[in-house]
Image (spheres, helix red, strand yellow):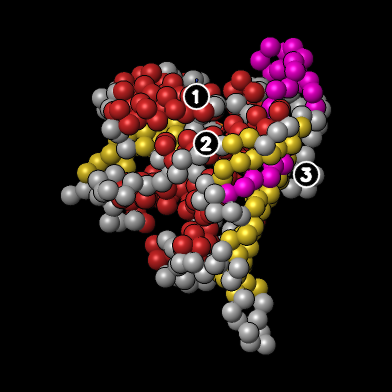
Amino acid sequence: MKKKIRVGMIGYGFMGKAHTNAFRQAAKFFPDLPYEPELKMFCARNEERAKQFADNWGYEKVVTDWQKIVESDEVDLIDICAPNNMHRDIAIAAAEAGKWVLTEKPLSLNVAQGEEMVAAVEKAGVPNMVWYNYRRIPSVTLAKNIVDRGSLGKIFHYRANFLQDWTISADLPQGGEGLWRLDVDVAGSGVTGDLLAHCIDTAMWLNGSIVEVSAMTETFIKEREHSLTGKVQKVGIDDACAFLAKFENGSLAIFESTRYARGHKALYTFEINGEKSSISWDLHDLHRLKYFDHSDESIVRGWRDIHVTDGDQPYMDKWWVPGLNIGFEHSFTHGVADFLASVDSENKAQPDFRNALQTQKVCEAVINSGKSRQWEKTKVEL
Ligand SMILES: NC(=O)c1ccc[n+]([C@@H]2O[C@H](COP(=O)([O-])OP(=O)(O)OC[C@H]3O[C@@H](n4cnc5c(N)ncnc54)[C@H](O)[C@@H]3O)[C@@H](O)[C@H]2O)c1
């Protein structure tokens, strides 16, 4: 008989849906998990919309105050899908209440908050994880396997982009529902914490610690009306950011992110160049991994385009038949499965809060470097 784990979810936006779907799917597609998620309680401030969401997805109860869900003895696990400025208070309260805690990325608004969160979950000894979901796209997990096998040899270069185009209009307000990402008090930063955080997490997972960064940040639209106050206010986020980085293993990196790349909606790409081979990946083609093997001296040498759908490739034995793709949402199902499978084991699902704090340190060094125009040390401890 499986143990039930009663889920308390906060937030019904983009991630609230993605995670709820994952909690519903995980036990079905990963039948050997030791725990079975039960959608127990849901929290959002607007009661009517919260009820609609809860009814649609099958949560038993609704509350409108996150403190109630955190304190409830009907819930074992708290999942935070609210904006970034909410992560710290909810996570610390949940840990102090002895709940398992999952939070969306970035871990926190800044490193100081992240350190408090790490201290809280470690003091309480509660299982914890941050949803850097790109690690769990099978083709990206395959890239990790290839790197860990040493197939790339010495790594020289890492480059990543995350490009969007949705904030180009100067008429777009900042703050409030749907636009909190433009309000620095709620988001913490702009593209650095929102998009580059994903690239940094993947990069350090694949290629080790980033030790130093030199960044250029820009806010193209300096003032925007605030949706909540109606006043025109200074924009405090970085609209675009490009940074150079050095890894502990000696490799060099270049990262770029913007919300001003007309035509790009969510173009996350990375490429790694090693002495023996290279790999490259593109979110728009997320079931594929490109691989160049220098040891192939045959007449048909060249970049291989690996369609990652076979049963011996990461996670794919749990899904359809070889040749059929899975998508973005499955990375969250894999997150739930890995987390629940690891709770009682020595090898905890990653990134946990401490691991995600390292990404926060790089983000903060990037923002600081953008201001100081100097190279900044990251103080990452992996
Ligand atoms: N892993 C990923 O790929 C990914 C993608 C998008 C967002 N995110 C992260 O997920 C988090 C949420 O982002 P989103 O896109 O789902 O945002 P969203 O704006 O779509 O939804 C946010 C939700 O939080 C709720 N909320 C806000 N304040 C609240 C409060 N005080 N109490 C209770 N609920 C409150 C809102 O009502 C809404 O339901 C952010 O931290 C974001 O960075 C991660």
Residue 288 in view, yes or no: no
Q: Residues within 10 Å of mark 3 (few under 14, many from 20)?
A: some
The residues tagged by marks 1 and 3 sit, at their Cα atoms, a distance apart of 32 Å
Q: Position of residue 21 (x, y in %)?
A: 44, 44
Asked if residue 313 is among those painted magenta in the image, a careful observer would answer no
Residues drawn in magenta: 221-247
The quarter of the displayed image where residue 185 is located: top right
- Please name which of the two marks, 2 or 3, marks the residue nearer to the observer: 2
- Residue under label 1: 112
The residue nearer to you, when weighing 143 against 34, is 143
Checking the image for residue 379, the label placed there is 2
Q: Position of residue 124 (x, y in %)?
A: 29, 28
- Residue under label 3: 261
The residues tagged by marks 2 and 1 sit, at their Cα atoms, a distance apart of 13 Å
The residue nearer to you, when weighing 284 against 153, is 153
Circle 2 sits in a helix, a strand or a loop, which is it?
Answer: loop
Ligand 1 shown in quarter: top right
Checking the image for residue 62, the label placed there is none
Residue at 68% over, 12% down: 229
Q: Position of residue 60 (x, y in %)?
A: 34, 31
